[in-house]
Image (spheres, rainbow, N blue to C red):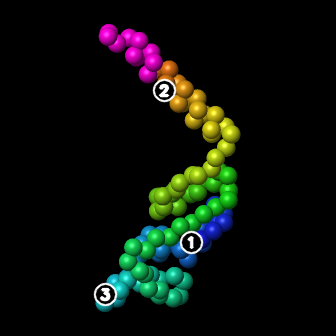
């Protein structure tokens, strides 16, 4: 886990993000800087940021899965509005259906 990154990632992580693993016998290795490190089966890397709305480059976005866990009042209002709108549409369709 790498915590509190900015909008730019260190290029030293490129091989890890691109999964450029080297097979050496039965083990996998990845080159990080000038070192080759062993990679365990099922390896995952998690990178977090405290930035409210980070603008990552298309290259970073293509190599990663970005999940936004930010909760804001505006976001909650929009979500509640969407639920209410859906509920009203459903009620409207029920009234149109013959019983």
Q: Is residue 27 above or below residue 76?
A: below
Is 81 left, or right, of 36 in this rendering?
A: right
Q: Nearer the viewer, residue 88 or 37?
A: 88
Q: Position of residue 94 (x, y in %)?
A: 39, 16
Residue at 43% of width from left, 74% of height from top?
43
Q: Which residue is mark 1?
A: 1
Residue at 47% of width from left, 62% of height from top?
63
Q: CA distance from mark 3 to mark 2?
A: 53 Å
Task: Judge whether residue 91 is colored magenta.
Answer: yes
Q: Quadrant of the C terminus?
A: top left
Q: Earlier in the sequence, mark 1 or mark 3?
A: 1
Q: Position of residue 51 (x, y in %)?
A: 68, 56
Q: Earlier in the sequence, mark 2 or mark 1?
A: 1
Q: Nearer the viewer, residue 33 or 52?
A: 52
Q: CA distance from mark 1 to mark 3?
A: 25 Å
Q: Position of residue 90 (x, y in %)?
A: 44, 22
For the residues labelled 2 and 1, say whether their Cβ atoms are less than 8 Å apart.
no
Crowding near the residue tagged with mark 2, few <14, some 14–19, many ≥20 C-alpha atoms within 10 Å: few
Q: Position of residue 73 (x, y in %)?
A: 68, 39
Task: Judge whether residue 85 is colored magenta.
Answer: no
Task: State the SS at label 3.
Answer: loop
Quadrant of residue 11 within the rendered picture: bottom right
Is 74 left, or right, of 97 in this rendering?
A: right
Q: Nearer the viewer, residue 78 or 87?
A: 87
Q: Which residue is mark 3?
A: 26
Can you tell which of label 2 and label 1 is closer to the viewer? Answer: 2
Q: Which residue is mark 2?
A: 86
Is 80 left, or right, of 97 in this rendering?
A: right
**Magenta residues, as a range?**
90-99
| Residue 8 in view in this figure | no
Crowding near the residue tagged with mark 3, few <14, some 14–19, many ≥20 C-alpha atoms within 10 Å: few
């Amino acid at each position: 886990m790498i915590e509190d990154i900015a909008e730019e990632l260190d290029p030293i992580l490129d091989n890890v993000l691109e999964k450029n693993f080297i097979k050496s016998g039965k083990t996998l290795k990845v080159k990080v800087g000038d070192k080759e490190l062993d990679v365990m089966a099922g390896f995952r890397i998690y990178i977090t940021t405290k930035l409210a709305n980070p603008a990552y480059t298309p290259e970073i976005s293509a190599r990663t899965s970005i999940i936004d866990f930010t909760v804001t009042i505006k976001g909650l209002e929009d979500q509640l509005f969407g639920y209410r709108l859906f509920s009203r549409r459903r009620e409207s369709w029920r009234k149109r259906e013959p019983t």
